Image (tube, grey):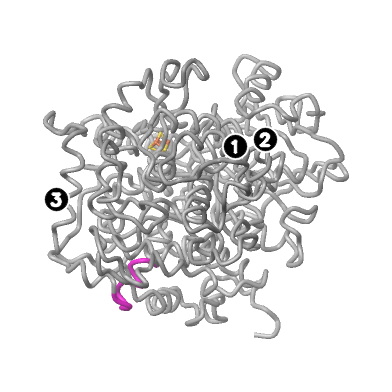
Amino acid sequence: MTSVMGKICFVDLSSMKIELRDIDPAITKDVGSGIGLAAYLLNQEIPVDADPLGPDNVLAFMSGLLTGTGAPVSGRWMVACKSPITGGWGDANCGGTLSPAIKQCGVDGIFFKGIASYPMLFVFDENGPRLEDARDLWGKDAVESEAILWERYQTKRKPAVATIGMAGEKRSKIAGIVNDRGRLAARSGVGAVMGSKNLKAVVLNGKQIVPVFDRMKMAELSKEFTKKVTDASLPPILNGKIVPILGKVMAMGKTYGASDGMLAISVMKKWGTIVNNTMGLHNGDDPIQNWKGSDGDLPRKYARNMNPDGIVSHQTKKYHCSSCVIGCGGICDVDELTKGEYKETHKPEYETVNAFGALLLNEDMDVIYRINERLNRAGMDSISAGSTVAFAMECFENGLLTKNETDGLDLRWGNSDALVQLIDKMITREGIGDLLADGVKEASRKILNSASMAITAGGQEPGMHDPRMDPMLGIHFSADPTPGRHTVGGGSYYNSLHLWEVVPWAPKVKPKSKKSDDYLASEENGMKAVAGAAYKQLTDIAGGCLFAMATGYRHWRLFDYLNAATGWDRSPVEYMEMGLRSQTLRQLFNIRHGIDPIDFKIHDRIAGIPPMTKGPNKGKTLQIDGMLREHWLGFGWDEKGIPTRETLTKLNLEEFIPEDK
Ligand code: SF4
């Protein structure tokens, strides 16, 4: 008995045919479930000439191998497809309640191809899977649509719903998919793909029980992690005002060593991700003014207005994704802050606050609450939206955009008065909003001489963490098959994973490692990034959360959870091979769809070419080309990032060896 359900539900929206297909257990033994299984199947299902917004693209909703098993913090769901942003592999990951609901329908994933002739819903409950008319919901925002569907399909319990808002309906390439009242699977343009299929929402309300190989062991392991999380606490002296000072102190160190990831859990419990809005200001992690500024350029009240204690003071309840014992989320009362426009919103994430704060030199937090709720309802990626506004502001500064093109909006740095209007225009694709609604890459193509300001990796706006501060991020931003991906984690995550204790090929973090060495194109740096990426893939196969993962394998015992759930009795090295396999399949998808991996390399500005002349990242440059080469070779790919025949054979992926190789 394993925690794999062994079936995928295939839905053809053009023909309205639905079938349940068995998955060969030999495949799940190799690639697991979650992102690994999606990467295996979509390599077969999506033809190389598929238009990302056309009928041949397949949108896959996936649950995880550990989801529903009682393993802690394992309730994330993933969605994968061909990305309309890069033309290659696309995926996004989200918490909330959808992941267990997929498995409770008796399947590991639900795949959609084709295009419905009018807006439809997919419903899977005790009456089975079916398509229903959703024309009454088209045009409604995600939160409103979800509330209607919760009521309409309520049985003894509320169904899980994933839906698009206006951004997905209008096929904005920076649209995501929403569940749980505004949590987004945001990246890769997955919402545009759902909109292009005329699929408004997925409603799940099954009752199946997820099998577990050893429930007693799982309960024991879960109890152990829960206790560690409960016991994790910060010294009372550490408050929001001290956080920026901590960032400054961190920037002063010239060396580092391995760390204990549980320290971060107490921070996450207290504040959530917003702690980084002030901690990262002075250590160089937070991108400022479209990645060209530094802490000295910020408006005077920025750190005070973004104080995490101030944001948490509006939190009325904590928010946990399914099976999470950490609970980094929260719901904030914003009635007064938004002048009655919204009653509440999810506590904004660090990424959103930075993308609409420091990146734009905006110090108005009240405007960020309003934008946060607007984007959640529209289903638009806040990283990409904020990055696109930053790009537009730099174009405005340099005269490439004037008020004639911006519908009269004054896009000066820090002008918060223009922001809400601009976001509304992007959501509705009105005027200047239409130019910006597809993200930085598309906007830059239409604005002459703007390439030097268009900060992307392979066309995707990178997450709000600066590779000039953590060079391993530069590798992941450039080398992940979904470029710009910050959630693979950088060097600071690697230092807390302790993988080298159980995976001999993962380089050990030595005491007093020199920070300056991290900028070099060394085999060691390339291999550390391989181990980090493979472990993140395994986490995404399992449906785990990045923040639990970052505590390290000794605390969030992923290898042990997997054995308890599946009975596979594998070693960490064998499980890491599953992660390598998944990453290789994602890379193969890109190669097959015509992508040259070097084209995903980060924009020169964020590789420190030329280096900054001020701030904590002053003088820092990554040897990015050489780092990528070492990373790809570490995977057993060639130096151009193409998986070799030998590696595909070793990973049992012979069926994907191209005929001419
Ligand atoms: S740590 Fe935060 S993001 Fe991760 S599962 Fe828990 S609530 Fe969700």
Residue 495, quarter of the rendered image: bottom left
Residue 616 in the image: x percent, y percent? 23, 58
Please name the residue that numbered disc 1 is placed on. Answer: 379
Circle 1 SS class: loop
Tell which circle, 2 or 1, labels the residue nearer the N-terminal end.
2
Q: Is mark 3 within 8 Å of ligand 1?
A: no
Residue 655, quarter of the rendered image: bottom right
Please name the residue that numbered disc 2 is placed on. Answer: 166
Instruction: Relative to 24, say whether 344 is above or below.
Output: above
Residue at left offset 45%, top offset 65%: 577
Residue at left offset 41%, top offset 73%: 631
Please say if the residues under marks 2 and 3 sit with CB atoms less than 8 Å apart: no
Ligand 1 positioned in quadrant: top left
Residue 610 in the image: x percent, y percent? 35, 72
Magenta-colored stretch includes residue 187: no
First to last magenta residue range? 520-530
Please say if the residues under marks 2 and 1 sit with CB atoms less than 8 Å apart: yes
Residue at left offset 51%, top offset 61%: 454
Tag 2: amino acid: Met
Please name the residue that numbered disc 3 is placed on. Answer: 249
Q: How many numbered discs, if any? A: 3
Q: Mark 2 and mark 1: span between their CA atoms?
A: 7 Å
**Foreground pick, 404 / 280:** 404
Tag 3: amino acid: Val
Magenta-colored stretch includes residue 525: yes
